[in-house]
Structure formats: C-alpha cells, structure tokens
Amino acid sequence: MGTDCEHRRELIRQRLEFLAGVMGVEVLGYSVMSNHIHCVLCSRPDVVAGRSDEEVAAKWWALCPLRKSKDGNAAEPTEFEINAIKNDKQQLKERRSRLSSISWFMRFLCEKVARESNKQDSCTGRFWEGRFKAQVLADEAALLACMQYVDLNPVRAKLAATPETSDFTSAQDRIIDAKTADEVSTPDARDKRMEHGKRAVWLAPVSLVPPRKAVREKATNRRASNKGFLDIGLGDYLQLLDWTGRQIRNGKRGAIHKHLSLILQRLDM
C-alpha cells in the first residue's frame, strides 16, 4: 500500500508500441488510466498475409523467443532458429493467423504487464481483474465516437484539463508530433513530422486520404501499415475532440472549460 505505480502507465504504453510494430494489428487510439486501459484496434490479416514465411517467423520469435538477452528482451535469433519456425508449415499457418488476432494482441499486452508488475511487487497471482471486454465498431460514425471517448478519458475523469495535457493518450502523442512540425518549413517535411514523428509513428494515421502521397508511402516498421482510418484530417479531428470535450456529460466529472481558447489556437497551429 502507498506504492507509486505511475511508471506502469509508461510500461503499458511501451508494450503497445512494441506490439504495434510486430503484429498485424493497428493501434488507432489508446488511453492508459490509473486502473484501466482503453485501446481502439484494427485487425489487419491482409498485412500479415503479405509477409514472407521468414518475416512471420522473425515476428513470432520477437513475441515468443526461446532465448532472451540479459535485459529480458528477445535475443537475436540464429538462422537455424528462424528456419525451425519457418519450416513447420502447420504451426507457421497458425502463428500467421495469431499475428493479426485482437485476442492474441491483448494476451501479449496483458501477460507482459502482469509479469513485470508482479516481479516489481515480489508477488504472484492474477494482476488484471478479468479478461478484456471488446466492442465491434461497425462504421465510421461508431469509430469516431469511440476515438473521442478514449482520447477524452482523462478530461472526463477530471485528471486533465485538455487533450494536450492528457498524459498517456493517443491524442497527446499526435499533438506532440504536430507541434514539432512547426520546426520545419516545407509541406512535405511538416507532414512527415506529423505522420512519422517520434511520438506517434506507431499509431495508425488519422486521415484516410493523405495530403501528400509520398509521405504516406514512406516505409516504416513501427506499425502494421500507413493506412488511415477516418475521412477527416488531424486538425479537424482535434477540433472535434475539443468541441466534444466542452460538452457537459451526465455521470462525468470533467469537461474542457468553456472559457479556454479553441485547441488550434492554444497549440498555435
């Protein structure tokens, strides 16, 4: 009792980022709260289907290594170890399927966090209260509403005043990269900072239609693909997030204060 476990929020964020770069599951949005997490995920079996057998074997080794380095991460696999995974065709087929599974994504997330937390607490047993709950988002309206709900969690819980001060959220990550875009002068360079910035590059881009195609086609191994998920740009999404956050909601303690300037003005964007 009385132990500060705030560092575990960063542990969860780092694990999400790692899984986004290994699995065929896109992380559209997330928020890590003090006692629960929210993730908006998109399964991409089409992405995994396009990977070679060797790539699938390497990804699986990263998730389930038979050897680990001193820091506890996967050791560099040998050619023999990769071939052992690759040449077992029946198991490889199953592992290819698991790489785009939401259930396996959550298993790899929760198991790692539980093990690390129990190790820190010098205890054993269940860490999470129960299995994760999932809701299918059938259309873009549902997806947009869910994204707003997830990104506004700290505001609604009265833990943050604005999206830009909401720690451990996808909104804050995207805002941090968008702010660094002001440091460069050309449109291509600005879009590169926003879509491939250091903070949010592992998250799926917001806009389905990029303003500059060349930037969207830039290769990355930090996420499953560069495909966006909404028919609006990041600026429009943030404005809608700001407007939604100002609405008073029954049963929710917090809201963005009505006297604050609009988000793009506050961010000087």
Image (cartoon, rainbow, N blue to C red):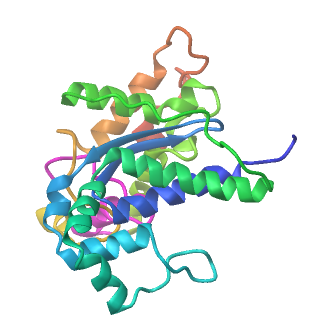
Above or below residue 80? Residue 35 is above
Of the pair 37 and 211, the residue shown nearer to us: 37
Judge by depth and name the residue closer to the eye, 120 or 16: 120
Secondary structure mostly seen in the magenta stretch: loop
Residue 147 position by quadrant? top left
Is residue 167 among the parts visible in the rendering?
yes
Give left or right: position of 143 versus 201.
Answer: left
The residue nearer to you, when weighing 104 against 38, is 104
Residue, x 44% and y 47% (percent of image)?
106
Residue with the most extreme top position: 250
Q: Position of residue 120 (x, y in %)?
A: 76, 58
Q: Give the residue at x 22% y 79%.
A: 87
Point 59% across, 21% down: residue: 254
Q: Does the stretch in magenta take in 194?
A: yes
State which quadrant residue 17 falls in: bottom left
* Residue drawn at point x = 50 percent, y = 44 percent: 169
* Residues shaded magenta: 184-211
Foreground residue among 180 and 43: 43
Left or right: 4 as drawn, with respect to 29 = right
246 shown above or below 140:
above
Screen quadrant of the N terminus: top right
Give x and y (percent) for residue 21: 36, 65
- In this rendering, does residue 262 appear at all? no
Task: Give the side of residue 227 with respect to residue 63, left or right.
Answer: left
> Which residue is outermost to the right?
2
Residue farthest toward the bottom in the current orientation of the protein: 79
Residue 157 position (above or below residue 248): below
Q: Is residue 84 in the magenta section?
A: no
Measured as percent of width and height from the top left, residue 212 is found at: 15, 61
